[in-house]
Amino acid sequence: MIELAFSILASDFAHLADEVAAAERGGGTIVHVDIMDGHFVPNITFGPAMVKALRPVTKLPLDCHLMIENPDQFIPDFAEAGADFVSVHQEACRHLYRTLQLIEQHGMRPAVVINPATPVEMLIEVLPMVHHVLVMSVNPGFGGQKFLPLALDKIEHLAELRTEMGLNYRIEVDGGVAHDTVARVVEAGADMLVAGSAVFSPGRTEQNARELLRLAREAGAADAEAGAGQAGTAGTQPED
Ligand code: DX5
Ligand code: ZN
């Protein structure tokens, strides 16, 4: 199922609960929370206190994207704050396997993220233990950046690996996902779509979310139909 993980980084923080409610009315089903520490990325946002404040205002899963050094140190705090999914950057974890185990041990769903310069191959060993893989389609740190098409091949590769390895992790994409790029990421195989600036804008958040999801689901349906068409053609090959 294709889901919209709306990134509150682009929302109006002074009215956060209303912003979340508007994106949810538009069909968003995951709250994406970008945690930045000013070290791993050149920007500072918020921490576990923000997750704790969000917890009572929505029933949707809180998807915490940790762009921080030493994530292990903060995992218990995110668990206590009410996080559902916690994703950590492959580039930030010296002992990635241990960090993912730690997230799981704290009752949350572990996920791993790769920057634009990191190949999918770096994740092979941990794919069986993650709820999802997050492919960055911008350099992490800021909203509103231009989509990097190199993410498309990585999404396709992850979808192939999932089949080959008999796994069921989900594929999330983050950065520059908007009305003009969403069809391509869905066709490549992403099914958790992070979007910030394409969703949040004063008075238009609900309809932005709805429209983005409509475009995503149309692309998904067209893709499924094309796949079925190919299978049908293969199935009707004359025997010789
Ligand atoms: C960037 C963050 C993103 C960001 C996406 O480092 O991880 O989640 O909010 O913003 P848009 O959708 O505006 O590219
Ligand atoms: Zn993010």
Image (cartoon, rainbow, N blue to C red):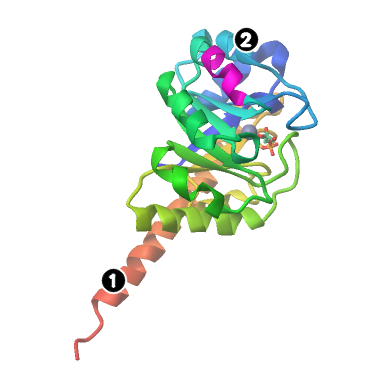
Q: Amino acid at mark 1?
A: Gly
Residue 233 quadrant: bottom left
Q: Is residue 164 above or below residue 168?
A: below
Write down the residue under mark 2.
49
Q: Of all residues shown, which one is farthest toward the right?
A: 42
Query: Which stretch is magenta?
Result: 71-78
Image quadrant of ligand 2 equals: top right
Residue displayed at 40% across by 65% down: 226
Name the residue nearer the viewer: 79 or 170. Answer: 79
Residue 88 place in picture, x, y as percent: 57, 32
Instruction: Specify few, some or many for label 2: CA neighbours under 10 Å numbering under 14, 14-19, or 20 or more.
Output: few
Write down the residue under mark 1.
232
Does 80 appear in magenta? no
- Taking the image as shown, residue 231 lies to the left or right of residue 208, namely left
Q: Is residue 27 above or below residue 106?
A: below
Q: Of all residues shown, which one is farthest toward the bottom?
A: 240
